[in-house]
Amino acid sequence: MDKIYLVGLPGSGKSHTGKWLSHKLGWDFVDLDELIEKNEKKSIADLFETLGEDGFRDIEQKYLTVTFSYKQCVVSCGGGTPAWSNNMENMGRHGLTVYLNTELGEIERRLEASKTLRPLLKHNQSLGKQILELNEKRRPYYSRAKVIWNRNEPSEQFFRSLDRLLAIY
């Protein structure tokens, strides 16, 4: 197996962990949102606004499918990617799926500190409540991952475990 798909809530550390992990493995790193923005020449927020969530998710699925042909690559998925259509199953067929199950309080802290606009998070509602609702909605999809990492940060143990699993697959 030569691909890892990182899934989890916005702010769970998928991009940070993906860059760290790809460096450790000597693999390429792809942020699915960045791939979409580069090719569509629009921000994720603009795509959500002009196409709606369903239209955006169709485009996201198209670019996710492109990653299936990549070799030796860590892919950081958007928070909603696994919850759309059959994306989670397809990622599992093409790579090792890893759910970053970061503590909700840590996610809230990261999102409050972040300057990145998250299209599904509304600024007029409690961030903690929105994170809790998103978690309830998406956890059934995330939990289908082959690996669940229940820490806030990656570690050498995380790397060694994934490295061993990749060798088995």
Image (tube, rainbow, N blue to C red):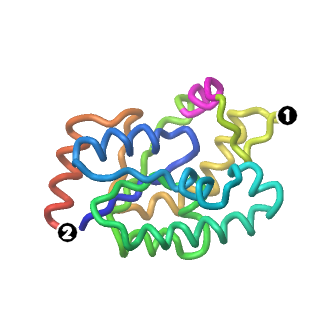
Instruction: Give the alpha-carbon distance from disc 2 to disc 1, as whole Å.
Output: 45 Å
- Please identify the quadrant where the N terminus is shown: bottom left
* Residue 147 percent location from the top left of the image: 33, 56
Q: Give x and y (percent) for residue 139.
A: 54, 55
Q: Main secondary structure of the magenta part?
A: helix
Is 112 magenta? The answer is yes
Q: In which quarter of the view is residue 90 placed?
A: bottom left
Asked if the residues shown at circle 2 and circle 1 are in contact, with their CB atoms under 8 angstroms apart, the answer is: no
Residue that label 1 marks: 124
Q: Residue at x 46, y 39 (%)?
A: 13
Q: Nearer the viewer, residue 121 or 76?
A: 76
Q: Quadrant of the C terminus?
A: bottom left
46 or 103: nearer the viewer: 46
Queried whether the magenta region covers residue 17, the answer comes back as no
Where are the magenta residues, as a range? 107-114
Measuring from the top left, give residue 115's x and y in whole percent. Answer: 66, 29
Quarter occupied by residue 35? bottom right
Q: In the drawing, what numbered circle is on residue 53?
A: none
Residue hosting label 2? 169
Q: Classify residue 136 as left or right of residue 56.
A: left
Asked whether, in this view, residue 79 is left or right of residue 75, the answer is right
Question: In the structure shown, which secondary structural element does the residue marked by tag 1 occupy?
Answer: loop
Q: Could you tell me the amino acid type at mark 2?
A: Tyr
155 relative to 37, above or below: above
- Front in this rendered view, residue 90 or 67: 67
Label located before the other in sequence (2 or 1)? 1
Q: Residue at x 74, y 49 (%)?
A: 45
Circle 2 packing at 10 Å, graded few (<14), some (14-19), many (20+), is few
Q: Circle 2 — which element?
A: loop
Q: Residue at x 45, y 59 (%)?
A: 143
Neighbour tally class for label 1: few under 14, some 14-19, many 20 plus, Cα within 10 Å: few
